[in-house]
Amino acid sequence: MTRILHLSDPHFGTVPDGLADALADCLRGLSPDITVVSGDLTQRARPAQFRAARAFLAACPAPVLAIPGNHDTPLWNPLRRLLQPWGHWQRHLGQPLQATLTAADTAIVALNTADPRRWKDGTITTAQLDTLSRSFATCRARHRIVALHHPPEPARGEPPSLHGAPAALAAFRDLGVEMVLSGHLHFTHIAPLAAAPAILSVQAGTCLSDRTRGDGNAFTCIDLTGTGARLTHYRATPSGRFEPDLAHDWARGPQGWELVRPVPPSPAPPP
């Protein structure tokens, strides 16, 4: 079994005091194989916010895979946004813009869909899909997962936010991708993609920001099994501790992903 912790949209610069430490404590207690943070690590791409994000990533259980979101490029400095959109990310965070991590028989390829030429929306390019194909060809993992900031398919009546999504979904299908991890919308949403039922979309809410949308501060623990996955939703309680509040078993069959049953979530590990 491979355990993946999926976080998104911490938005450092909008994080209540003490919440990042509580989250890091919870994550370490879960002993994941990979921790994924799918974008918007900062609120306004300022150096101090990136430094706070770097300290948080250092406190998370390794290995950590973090990619940018649309908030991680300067908003109020148009010249820097066009000429050096990732300068602060690279200088103060020290994370690659795209990367691949493997654990056991699982490979996660993270692609940077944040596009400095767009206000909020993202873009996925043919070159990135070529990179994805090469990455999966070299790692030869049984379970193939893609991490993006922008969801490839809108949820809950949201407008589409990823330009190039139809070509991306076709490539994901051809490459045997089983799961897509994303964020951006600040609420949790888990469902098979309508355009590709063999791919489970796992969209995370904001793990730390006070900019919540009815989901509170939350993240998802993904336990991959031989035939599917157990997904456990963790939410911050009023006391500031992260606790599991919902768990579901999913199975991947010939017709795609299907929800098997809800299961009682296990208690959170002690801090």
Image (cartoon, grey):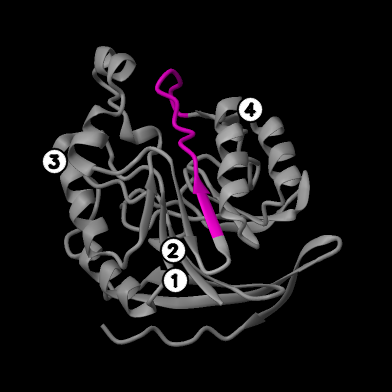
**Outermost front residue:** 138
Percent x, y of residue 108: 52, 54
Q: Is residue 65 rendered to the left or right of residue 247?
A: left
Screen quadrant of the C terminus: bottom left
Classed neighbour count for the residue bearing mark 3: other residues with Cα under 10 Å, few (<14), some (14–19), many (≥20): some
**Which residue is label 3 attached to?**
48
Residue 109 is covered by the magenta coloring: yes
Determine whether label 4 and label 3 are within 8 Å by CB.
Answer: no
Badge 2 amino acid: Phe
| Quadrant that contains the N terminus | bottom right
Structural distance between the alpha carbons of marks 1 and 2 = 5 Å
Q: Position of residue 133 (x, y in %)?
A: 62, 40
Instruction: Give left or right: position of 197 versus 46.
Output: right
Of residues 220 and 185, the one nearer the viewer is 220
Query: First in sequence: mark 3 or mark 2?
Result: 3
Q: From which residue to which does the magenta span run? A: 107-120
Prevailing secondary structure of the magenta residues: loop
Q: Residue at x 49, y 40 (%)?
A: 111
Q: Check contact, mark 4 vs mark 1: CB within 8 A.
A: no
Residue at image x 75%, y 43%? 174
- Name the outermost residue toward the top: 79
According to the image, label 4 marks what residue?
164
CB under 8 Å between discs 1 and 2: yes
Q: Which amino acid does the dot numbered 1 rest on?
A: Tyr
Badge 1: residue crowd in 10 Å (few <14, some 14–19, many ≥20): many
Q: Nearer the viewer, mark 4 or mark 3?
A: 4
Q: Which residue is mark 2?
A: 219
Left or right of 34, for residue 240: left
Kindly report the distance in space between the C-alpha atoms of the residues bearing marks 3 and 2.
24 Å
